[in-house]
C-alpha cells in the first residue's frame, strides 16, 4: 500500500517511511511501538485535541510542556528536573512549522534513555540545527493533509530501517477495509468544495453540515465528554473506544486507501516543492508585517504563520467578512481544556495561554490579502508576552529555539 509514495518520501527525508491513511494513525502506531502503557509523555498544550486523544488511546498520560509564548514552541529549559525524571517519551509538535528545539530534546532523551517522537504534521519543509524536522527522533510522523493539501494520508518515518516490517504489520492490523462510498466521497470532494466556493455558499453549507450532525466542532475544541472519556481511558490502550474523538475532521483516518486516492496524493506530493517555495515566500511577507517579527535562523516554509494580535476574535471576524477562514486554532491549551483528571499541567501555564489567546494562524499563500484586511480593520499587534518563568530563574529569561517567527517584542536576533 502506497509504496510509490513511500519511495518519494524516503528520498526526501532520507529515512525509511511507511504510508498510512493519516498522520494521527502514524502517531498511534509509533506510541504503541515505543511506549509502554501507563507511561508519561511530554507534549505541547497548544496542539490539536485529536493528538491529545491519540496519546490517551495509546494508554499514556499526557504531561504538558512549558511553551515559549513567542512562537508556541516547547520551552525545554523550563521543564523542571523532577519532571524529566518521570518521563517515558517526548513528542514534539513543531506548531505551524516552527521547529521545537529538537537537538536539545534529542540530547535530553538520550541522557534519560527515552524515545523522542517528532510530530512533523505542520513542518514537512522546516529544519532545525541544519537538519530537517523529523530527522531527530526514533520516529517522526508527517501529514499529507497540510502543505500538500491532499486531505488524506501521512507517513511514519523511522531511524532504524529494520523496524519497518514490524511497524507495517502494526499498521495493517489497525486498518479498516476500504469503502467504495468513502473513496467516492473523496474523489468528489474537490469539485463539491470548488462549487460551494464558486457559489459563495460556504456559510449555508456549514449550517447544513451542522444540522446533519457532520460538523463536530462548535467551538475551537471539540466537546470533551469527560464521563465517556473516563470509560475510554479505562479501556486503553485501544483505538476503537476513542474513535469518536480521534476521527474528528477526518473520518477516513484509518481506512485502507483506494487506488484513486493514492494516485491523487502522489500527484500532489510531486508538487510539494513548489508549494513549499510558495509557503516560504508568503511566510517572509507575513514576518515583515507589524503583527510578527522574524526570529533567528532561516525563514521556514511555515504551514501557518502565527501572527500575534491584541484581539484575536476581532481579527478572525474581520478576515471572515472577506471570506478568509481562520483554521488551526488551538485555544485553550490542553490542560485548561481537559483538566488535571486527564493531563498534568505545565509548571507555568501562562505563556501557553497567552500564545493560544493571541495567535492568529495566517495562511502564507494568502499573505498579501490577509495583511491588507488586518491593516484596513485596524487590528493591533498583541502587547509583549509574559516572560517565561525558567526553572531556577524566577526572573525569567530570553532564549528559545531557532524559529520562524517571534512575537512583537522581537528577540532572538530578528
Ligand atoms: C499538530 C498536528 N499533528 C497531527 C495532526 C494529524 O494529522 P492528520 O489529519 O493527517 O491525521 C494534526 C491535524 O491537524 C495536527 O494539527
Image (cartoon, grey):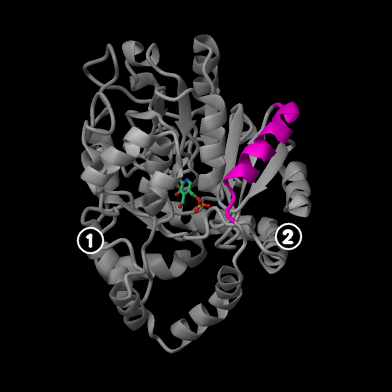
Nearer to me, 261 or 101 = 261
Work out whether 360 lies above or below 142. below
Main structural element of the magenta stretch: helix, strand or loop? Answer: helix
Q: Nearer the viewer, mark 2 or mark 1?
A: 2
CA separation in Å, label 2 and label 1: 37 Å
Q: Which mark is residue 272?
A: none
Answer with the quarter of the image where residue 123 lies: top right
* Residue plotted at (48% across, 22% down): 36
Nearer to me, 358 or 150 = 150
Q: Is residue 80 magenta?
A: no
Q: Position of residue 18 (x, y in %)?
A: 68, 43
Q: Position of residue 60 (x, y in %)?
A: 40, 29
Q: Position of residue 200 (x, y in %)?
A: 40, 86
Work out whether 259 lies above or below 224. below
Labels 2 and 1: the sequence-earlier one: 2
Mark 2 residue crowding within 10 angstroms, few (<14) / some (14–19) / many (20+): few
Q: Residue furthest bottom?
A: 199
Q: Give the quarter of the figure containing the C terminus.
A: top left
Disc 1 is placed on an element classified as helix
Confirm if mark 1 falls within 8 A of ligand 1.
Answer: no
Q: Which mark is residue 313?
A: 1
* Residue plotted at (39% across, 45% down): 241
* Residue plotted at (66% across, 65% down): 261
Q: Left of 404 or right of it: where is 161?
A: right
- On the question of residue 172 being in view, the answer is yes
Answer with the quarter of the image where residue 248 lies: bottom left
Q: Left of 322 or right of it: where is 335?
A: left
Disc 2 is placed on an element classified as helix
Q: Which residue is mark 2?
A: 270
Which contiguous range is marked in magenta? 160-176
Work out whether 10 lies above or below 369. above
Amino acid at each position: 500500500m502506497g509504496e510509490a509514495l513511500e519511495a518519494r518520501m524516503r528520498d526526501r527525508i532520507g529515512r525509511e517511511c511507511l504510508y498510512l491513511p493519516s498522520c494521527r494513525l502514524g502517531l498511534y502506531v509509533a506510541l504503541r511501538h515505543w511506549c509502554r502503557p501507563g507511561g508519561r509523555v511530554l507534549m505541547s498544550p497548544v496542539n490539536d485535541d485529536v493528538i491529545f486523544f491519540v496519546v490517551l488511546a495509546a494508554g499514556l498520560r499526557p504531561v504538558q510542556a512549558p511553551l515559549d509564548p513567542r512562537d508556541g514552541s516547547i520551552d525545554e529549559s523550563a521543564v523542571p528536573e523532577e519532571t524529566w525524571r518521570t518521563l517515558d517519551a517526548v513528542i514534539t509538535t513543531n506548531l505551524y512549522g516552527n521547529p521545537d528545539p529538537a537537538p536539545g530534546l534529542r540530547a535530553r532523551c538520550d541522557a534519560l534513555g527515552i524515545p523522542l517522537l517528532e510530530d512533523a504534521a505542520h513542518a514537512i519543509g522546516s529544519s532545525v540545527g541544519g537538519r530537517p524536522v523529523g530527522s531527530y527522533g526514533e520516529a517522526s510522523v508527517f501529514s499529507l493533509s497540510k502543505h500538500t493539501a491532499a486531505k488524506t494520508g501521512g507517513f511514519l518515518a523511522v531511524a532504524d530501517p529494520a523496524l519497518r516490517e514490524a511497524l507495517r504489520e502494526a499498521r495493517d492490523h489497525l486498518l479498516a477495509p476500504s469503502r467504495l462510498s468513502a473513496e467516492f466521497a473523496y474523489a468528489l470532494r474537490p469539485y463539491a468544495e470548488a462549487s460551494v466556493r464558486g457559489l459563495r455558499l460556504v456559510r449555508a453549507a456549514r449550517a447544513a453540515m451542522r444540522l446533519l450532525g457532520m460538523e463536530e466542532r462548535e467551538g475551537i475544541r471539540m466537546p470533551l465528554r469527560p464521563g465517556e472519556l473516563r470509560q475510554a481511558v479505562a479501556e486503553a490502550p485501544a483505538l476503537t473506544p476513542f474513535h469518536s474523538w480521534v476521527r474528528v475532521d477526518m473520518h477516513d483516518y484509518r481506512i485502507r486507501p483506494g487506488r484513486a486516492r493514492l494516485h491523487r496524493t502522489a500527484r500532489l506530493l510531486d508538487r510539494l516543492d513548489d508549494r513549499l517555495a510558495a509557503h516560504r515566500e508568503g511566510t517572509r511577507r507575513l514576518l515583515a508585517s507589524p503583527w510578527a517579527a522574524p526570529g533567528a535562523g532561516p525563514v521556514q516554509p511555515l504551514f501557518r504563520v502565527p501572527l500575534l494580535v491584541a484581539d484575536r476574535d476581532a481579527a478572525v471576524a474581520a478576515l471572515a467578512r472577506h471570506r478568509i477562514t481562520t483554521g488551526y486554532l488551538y485555544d485553550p491549551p490542553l490542560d485548561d481544556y481537559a483538566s488535571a483528571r486527564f493531563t498534568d499541567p505545565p509548571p507555568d501555564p501562562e505563556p501557553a495561554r497567552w500564545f493560544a489567546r493571541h495567535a492568529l494562524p495566517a495562511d502564507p499563500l494568502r499573505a498579501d490579502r490577509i495583511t491588507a484586511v488586518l491593516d484596513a480593520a485596524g487590528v493591533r499587534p498583541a502587547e509583549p508576552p509574559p516572560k517565561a518563568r525558567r526553572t531556577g530563574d524566577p526572573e525569567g529569561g530570553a532564549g528559545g529555539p531557532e524559529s520562524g517567527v517571534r512575537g512583537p517584542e522581537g528577540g532572538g536576533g530578528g
